Image (tube, rainbow, N blue to C red):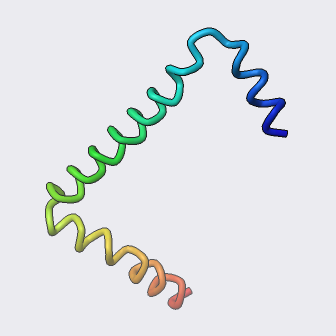
Amino acid sequence: MLKFIKGNLESIDGVSVYPIISLLIFFIFFVILFWWVFTAKKEHIKQVSKIPLENDKNNQQL
């Protein structure tokens, strides 16, 4: 099956650019995510971490 995919990709001009673009998108996404994690406010993290517990309490009351 790989032969069919590889054969189709070889016929596309400039196909070698797509892996580089994919790697850049992947790298930029995780750099931004890493930056957000370290700059997020501690109060926000605590509030968001309590959401599953709050939902569980609401379900038990119903």
Q: Is residue 7 left or right of residue 46?
A: right
Q: Is residue 44 above or below residue 15?
A: below
Pick the front one: 1 or 48: 1
Q: Which quadrant, please, contains the C terminus? A: bottom right
Left or right: residue 38 versus residue 62 is left
Q: Percent position (x, y) of residue 4?
A: 83, 30
Q: Quadrant of the N terminus?
A: top right
Residue ID at (23%, 73%): 46
Which residue is rendered at x = 77% and y = 30% of the image?
5
Asked which quadrant contains residue 44, the reply is: bottom left
| Position of residue 57 measured from the top left corner of the image (x, y, whole percent) | 44, 87
Of all residues shown, which one is farthest toward the top? Answer: 13
Q: Quadrant of residue 12?
A: top right
Judge left or right: residue 55 versus residue 16.
left
28 or 41, nearer to the observer: 28
**Left or right for 27, reference 19:** left
- Answer above or below: position of 21 versus 47: above
Residue 26 vertical placement versus 36 (above, below): above
From this view, report whether residue 17 is shown above or below residue 27: above
x and y percentages locating residue 40 in the rendered image = 18, 58
Quarter assignment of residue 8: top right
Residue 39, percent across and down?
A: 14, 55
Number of numbered discs: 0
- Residue at 74% x, 29% y: name it: 6
